[in-house]
Image: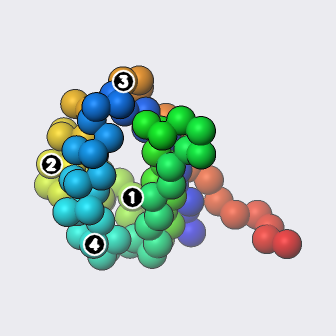
Amino acid sequence: MLIRIVRMTFKEDKVEAFLKNFDLNKEKIRNFPGCHHLELWQDENQKNIFMTYSYWESENSLDQYRDSELFKSVWSYTKTLFSERPQAFSSKKIEEV
């Protein structure tokens, strides 16, 4: 299982546009083959910073999503709303206590 976190900082006046677009696409992303979990987080203090937290079957599953028309359409719109370059992290869980 691959855990993917993407941190995105938006222009303050574009937050609502991002949230609307995420709402329109979240079920499609979550139901994409290989995606097992999807959450949207918001920074407690900086309300224009969001993170997606998702579980993917494998790196190959994530790559298939990133090559899909769904990703291309969502990401091409989302990146126009950024105020900073996004950061992405791929990890695997070692231990849960």
User: Looking at the rendered structure, which numbered label has been put on residue 83?
Assistant: 3
Tell me, yes or no, whether the two marked residues, 1 and 2, touch with CB atoms within 8 Å.
Answer: no
Tell me, yes or no, whether the two marked residues, 2 and 4, touch with CB atoms within 8 Å.
Answer: no
Return the disc, 1 or 2, that comes first in the chain's sequence.
Answer: 1
| Amino acid of disc 2 | Ser
Return the disc, 3 or 4, that comes first in the chain's sequence.
Answer: 4
User: Along the line of sight, which residue is nearer the eye, 26 or 36?
Assistant: 26
| Amino acid of disc 3 | Ser
- In space, the residues marked 3 and 2 are separated at their CA atoms by 19 Å
Question: Where residue 58 appears, x then y in whole percent?
Answer: 48, 65
Question: Where residue 87 appears, x then y in whole percent?
Answer: 49, 35
Return the disc, 1 or 4, that comes first in the chain's sequence.
Answer: 4
Q: Residue at x 28, y 56 (%)?
A: 22
Q: Which residue is mark 1?
A: 62
Question: Where residue 27 appears, x then y in whole percent?
Answer: 27, 72
The answer to whether one can see residue 96 in this image is yes
- Pointer 3 local density, CA inside 10 Å: few below 14, some 14–19, many at least 20: some
Q: Residue at x 69, y 63 (%)?
A: 93
